[in-house]
Amino acid sequence: MTIISILGGTGHEGSGLGLRWAKAGHSIIIGSRALEKAQTAAAELNAKLGANSVRGMDNAAAAKEGDIVVLAVPYSAHAATIESVKEAVQGKIFVDVTVPLVPPKVSRVQMPAAGSASQEAQNLLGPNVKVVSAFQNISAEHLKDSDHPIDCDVLVCGDDKDAKAVVIALATDAGIKAWDAGPLANAVIPEGLASVLIGLNLRYKVKSSGIRITGIE
Ligand SMILES: NC(=O)c1ccc[n+]([C@@H]2O[C@H](COP(=O)([O-])OP(=O)(O)OC[C@H]3O[C@@H](n4cnc5c(N)ncnc54)[C@H](OP(=O)(O)O)[C@@H]3O)[C@@H](O)[C@H]2O)c1
């Protein structure tokens, strides 16, 4: 069975993805800086699921144990978290969910010099890691109730076609329509779009605006 480890999985986005993937039958590890916090979050997800498919570990152990490693931490913790798991994720699919928000103006697109957070991840991890950029445009609000139908697509970017196909299948398992949006260099769009959606949420007083791709059967 494929093991999916979610670094920062104690948070809003990571725990929502973990809940939905566990419900779909995957083995999930919630990663945290603190083992006890990870174990508490895992126990809460298992209680919601009525199952025992979620474990909690510190981020280093989670990265080592997972076949697929997902990063869902605030951008301020992005580089340091990646550096801390660099060796453990060599040869693996590394899914970067991070949006490079720069507080306080989080509704303004402010991309890093490398182009995107996902590109920074690839640069830090090196060519043996298959970095896939995904899930930046799906609000945690949609994920936390696993029965809630999701009215939002996600764009999946990466330089390895097979790795992208794996992540698109994971999105499907989570009840989300995902599209192959091209190479990792294109991650600038979904990451930037996340700030646009935050602005729409603020201006239109909603919690979870999203996007749909149309015109493809
Ligand atoms: N929330 C959303 O709707 C949403 C949607 C799309 C994308 N995203 C992106 O997904 C990422 C996670 O978002 P979130 O809302 O889940 O964030 P969050 O709940 O604020 O944080 C996620 C986890 O990151 C860890 N963390 C926090 N500060 C850290 C630090 N200084 N160093 C290392 N780890 C730290 C914490 O885990 P531990 O304390 O357990 O280590 C925390 O539970 C962000 O980049 C966000 O932009 C969020």
Image (cartoon, grey):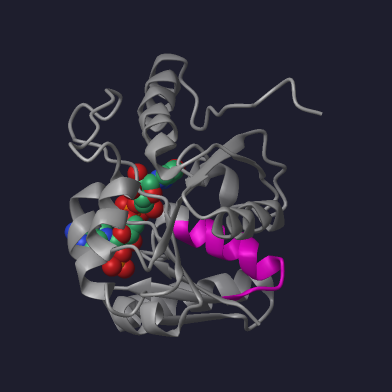
The image shows residue 80 at horizontal and vertical percentages of: 17, 63
Residue positioned 38% across, 66% down in the render: 129
The answer to whether residue 33 is seen in the rendering is no
The answer to whether residue 186 is seen in the rendering is yes
Kindly indicate the quadrant of the structure image that contains residue 178.
Answer: top right
In this view, the residue in front, 2 or 76, is 2
Residue 52 colored magenta? no
Q: Residue furthest right?
A: 217
Q: Which residues make up the magenta segment? A: 14-27
In this view, the residue in front, 56 or 214, is 214
Kindly indicate the quadrant of the structure image that contains residue 38.
Answer: bottom left
In this view, the residue in front, 83 or 201, is 83
* 164 lies above or below 85: above
The image shows residue 57 at horizontal and vertical percentages of: 38, 82
Residue 20 colored magenta? yes
* 111 lies above or below 27: above
Dominant secondary-structure state across the stretch colored magenta: helix
Image quarter (top left, top right, bottom left or bottom right) of the N terminus: bottom right
Q: Residue furthest top?
A: 203
From the viewer's perspective, tell me whether residue 211 is left or right of residue 190: right
Kindly indicate the quadrant of the structure image that contains residue 173.
Answer: bottom right
Image quarter (top left, top right, bottom left or bottom right) of the C terminus: top right
In this view, the residue in front, 183 or 154, is 183
Residue positioned 74% across, 20% down in the render: 215
Residue positioned 47% across, 48% down in the render: 158
The image shows residue 124 at horizontal and vertical percentages of: 23, 60
* 176 lies above or below 123: above
Residue positioned 51% across, 55% down in the render: 160
Q: Quadrant of ligand 1?
A: bottom left
